[in-house]
Image: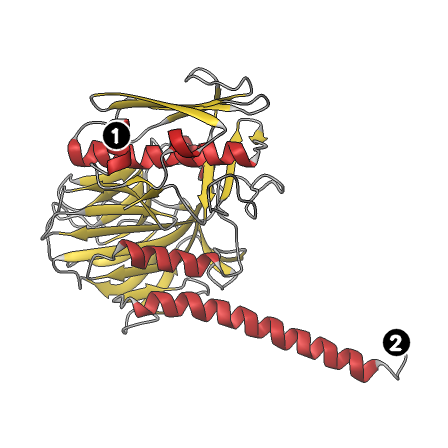
């Protein structure tokens, strides 16, 4: 390099390094500050070989097969702990501290499906026989939150979205109102009034139960926290939004460029949501009109799930609009979407919804559920779809939804 330009070049590099470091620090601070502001009783970043809680006086250290790796969750710290699924877990000095209510948060990235391993993957909790506070993936790949002897809330994420992808889990319990909620990537996906018992007094552990042993978590874990109150939906959404704005690993069902159309708006819908989907062959290429249809059917799925839990039945289309089950459509899809015709059918706990294309060249979609927890999702290039068409194995909608409180 010409010596005349060295001072300028070094100054530019120094400025860039300073700017980059400042940005990364701001991102990390934003997420950590957001979590700490909600007043957890313990918060472990899990980005080093061992450490102390960001709040309070408790500490954590790994046991067994645990390694520090790079490429963590999008929370501002690139490091995370990888548990080997055989002997590795995280021991903490946090014991009890939970009275009438509780919340737990963890970012997780599974290395394999529990169904393939043939055993339970424990996320975190204070295990106690007959008075559980346990969050775990079970052998059908469903995430279950146990809050008493056998009582649980559950959510079954699409298996194709689980392995090698970061997700933020939050589970909340209020023993006074009896409400239990599971949040997945900032959004409530399971709610019930199953309640649980107060006064959890056991050791808080991560990646393995201290009572129901042999449930070694296989994968990455980062940013685990415990509260002695039930977080509100807005607080969970704010925490996820703080992480979503930070640098780090990716979340979602697919990662193909050009699939999301996140900067576009279509017709009357003021949304820039990022919408992705994948089938057995990989990412599905979706036009923005098709993404809008998926947003409507995904909103119907969420609202119907609330109806099933709250009303013990599926909701009619009129109830999807009115919010009889708790949530409702932001827009009337039959009136506002010029590209699709929507049909809905319900019976008992079962429901079925179709988005049939009005114009050539658009895919058709079908969502069908026969009970609580599992939705069959399909698509067809022919413009109409039924439950026997091509399976959609994973979906991701970030930034906006078409269901509202």
In the picture provided, is 210 more to the left or to the right than 137? left
Q: By what rule are the colours in the image chosen?
A: secondary structure
Q: Identify the residue under disc 1.
A: 318
In the picture provided, is 3 more to the left or to the right than 149? right
Which callout, 2 or 1, points to the residue nearer the camera? 1
Pinpoint residue 253: horizontal percent, then vertical percent: 49, 39
Q: In front: 342, or 310?
A: 342
Q: Residue at x 76, y 80 (%)?
A: 10
Sequence-wise, the earlier of marks 2 and 1 is 2
Do we see residue 218 in this rendering?
Answer: yes
Q: Are marks 2 and 1 in contact (CB under 8 Å)?
A: no
Q: In front: 295, or 82?
A: 295
Q: Residue at x 88, y 83 (%)?
A: 3
Pinpoint residue 71: horizontal percent, then vertical percent: 54, 55
Pinpoint residue 105: horizontal percent, then vertical percent: 32, 55
Do we see residue 214 in this rendering?
Answer: no
Q: Label for residue 9?
A: none
Pinpoint residue 149: horizontal percent, then vertical percent: 13, 42
Q: Residue at x 50, y 35 (%)?
A: 291
In the picture provided, is 358 more to the left or to the right than 88? right
User: How would you rate the neighbour count of disc 2 (Cα within 10 Å): few for under 14, some for 14-19, many for 20 or more?
Assistant: few
- Say which element carries label 2: loop
Image position of 45 with respect to 195: above or below = below
- How many discs appear? 2
User: How would you rate the neighbour count of disc 1 (Cα within 10 Å): few for under 14, some for 14-19, many for 20 or more?
Assistant: few
Whole-angstrom CA distance, mark 2 to mark 1, is 71 Å
Q: Image quadrant of residue 232?
A: bottom left
Q: Identify the residue under disc 2.
A: 1
Image position of 89 with respect to 113: above or below = below
The N terminus: image quadrant: bottom right
- Say which element carries label 1: helix
């Amino acid at each position: 390099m010409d010596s005349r330009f060295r001072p300028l070049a070094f100054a530019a590099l120094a400025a860039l390094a300073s700017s980059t470091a400042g940005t990364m620090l701001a991102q990390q601070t934003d997420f950590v500050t957001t979590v700490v502001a909600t007043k957890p009783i313990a918060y472990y970043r899990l980005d080093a070989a061992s450490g102390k809680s960001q709040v309070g006086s408790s500490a954590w250290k790994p046991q067994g097969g645990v390694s520090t790796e790079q490429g963590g969750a999008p929370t501002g710290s690139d490091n995370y702990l990888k548990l080997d699924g055989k002997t590795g877990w995280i021991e903490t000095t946090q014991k009890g501290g939970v009275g009438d209510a509780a919340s737990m948060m963890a970012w997780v990235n599974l290395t394999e499906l529990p169904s393939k391993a043939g055993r339970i993957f424990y996320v975190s909790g204070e295990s106690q026989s007959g008075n559980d506070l346990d969050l775990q993936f079970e052998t059908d790949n469903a995430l279950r939150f146990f809050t008493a002897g056998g009582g649980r809330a559950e959510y079954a994420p699409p298996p194709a979205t689980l392995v090698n992808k970061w997700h933020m889990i939050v589970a909340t319990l209020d023993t006074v109102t009896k409400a239990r909620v599971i949040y997945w990537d900032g959004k409530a996906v399971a709610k019930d009034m199953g309640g649980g018992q107060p006064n959890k007094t056991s050791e808080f552990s991560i990646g393995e139960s201290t009572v129901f042993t042999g449930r070694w978590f296989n994968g990455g874990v980062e940013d685990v926290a415990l509260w002695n109150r039930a977080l509100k939906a807005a607080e969970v959404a704010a925490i996820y939004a703080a992480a979503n704005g930070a640098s780090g690993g990716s979340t979602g069902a697919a990662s193909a460029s050009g699939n999301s159309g996140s900067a576009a708006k279509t017709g009357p819908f003021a949304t820039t949501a990022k919408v992705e989907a994948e089938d057995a062959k990989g990412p599905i290429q979706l036009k923005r009109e098709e993404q809008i249809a998926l947003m409507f059917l995904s909103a119907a799925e969420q609202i119907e799930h609330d109806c099933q839990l709250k009303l013990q039945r599926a909701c009619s289309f009129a109830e999807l609009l009115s919010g009889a089950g708790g949530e409702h459509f932001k827009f009337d899809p039959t009136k506002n979407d010029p590209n699709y015709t929507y049909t809905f059918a319900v019976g008992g706990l079962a429901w079925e919804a179709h988005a049939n294309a009005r114009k050539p060249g658009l895919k058709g979609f079908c969502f069908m559920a026969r009970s609580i927890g599992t939705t069959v999702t399909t698509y067809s290039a022919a413009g109409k779809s039924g439950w026997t068409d091509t399976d959609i194995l994973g979906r991701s909608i970030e930034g906006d939804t078409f269901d509202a409180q």
